[in-house]
Image (cartoon, rainbow, N blue to C red):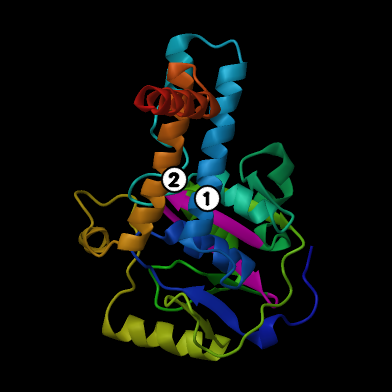
Amino acid sequence: MEMEGVSNGGMLYHEVQEAKLCAVHCVNTVLQGPFFSEFDLAALASELDSKERQMMQEGNLSSSSAGDYLSAESHNVSLGGDFSIQVLQKALEVWDLQVIAFDSPVAEQAQIDPDLENAFICHLHDHWYCIRKVNGEWYNFDSLYAAPQHLSKFYLAAYMDSLKNSGWSIFLVRGNFPKEFPIASSEVPNGYGQWVSPEDAARITESCNTTESPQTIDSTQQGPDPYQEILLEMEDQDLKAAIAASLMESSQAVARVETGSPQNDKEDTTDGNEEGKDKNTQ
């Protein structure tokens, strides 16, 4: 499953943490380019919510079971911007990529030799990031790092075992990854993405290691993570607006279901009332 040739001129695409957009960063670093925005993922979440509610309505579920899915609350995105694995999976399906649970029988070979794969998605405590093979070398594209960190092939298996033992959920990504993304410059319009060479990534990582320890999410830490608290305070207002719009659309759909009156019927009734008022006036 080795990927042939050098992609993106040998450059690495990395996104540094912005608000709680780690799911966006994860998807884009898997694809190695700024392919998706938070608004794109919010739209996919809304689409998934609508389909789930439709399935619940058509199925023969008890009212209590269906009520969870027919509520206005989204099951695929939180108000803080954390997306479900289904949203990430849907986004990657656009590029014909398949997301597979690492502990499934289909992933047995990856469990034995993870170097045979090309990408992994890791998740714990509302944080997503990817481990990706780019041009034959493995990198940790955690958005909490200033630059992608190189992982040797020998260390990869031990690192994956460490993640599993720490409670991380791991998924592997298979398929035909995008080969190139047009690089106009080193600057990326979204403001948090950057193209770096492997050499620059190594220098940035070394610089961070000599000045202070890299910021990572520790699954064993007690109490709130001050870095995460800062991220919450800095949360992007545009992201909140996108999530709110997604949930509002879902809420309106629920309201129509509960009243049992389609939107068109409401409009017809409104038109009829207005017509009657006109006649009385005449």
Is 132 included in the stretch rendered in magenta?
A: yes
Residue 13 placement: quadrant: bottom right
The amino acid sitting under disc 1 is Ala
Number of numbered tags placed on the structure image:
2
Residue, x 61% and y 48% (percent of image)? 89
59 relative to 272 in the view: left or right:
right
Which residue does the numbered mark 2 point to in the structure image?
246
Is 218 included in the stretch rendered in magenta?
A: no
Horizontal and vertical percent position of residue 186: 53, 89
Pick the front one: 171 or 206: 171
| Quarter of the rendering occupied by the C terminus | top left
Pick the front one: 219 or 257: 257
170 relative to 236 in the view: left or right:
right
Position above or below: 122 against 102: below
What whole-number distance in Å separates the C-alpha atoms at marks 1 and 2?
A: 7 Å
Few, some or many C-alpha atoms within 10 Å of disc 1 (few <14, some 14-19, many ≥20)? some
Residue 206 placement: quadrant: bottom left
Which residue does the numbered mark 1 point to in the structure image?
43
Q: Is residue 85 visible?
A: no
Pick the front one: 262 or 214: 262
Few, some or many C-alpha atoms within 10 Å of disc 2 (few <14, some 14-19, many ≥20)? many
| Quarter of the rendering occupied by the N terminus | bottom right
Asked whether the beta carbons under mark 1 and mark 2 sit within 8 Å of each other, the answer is yes
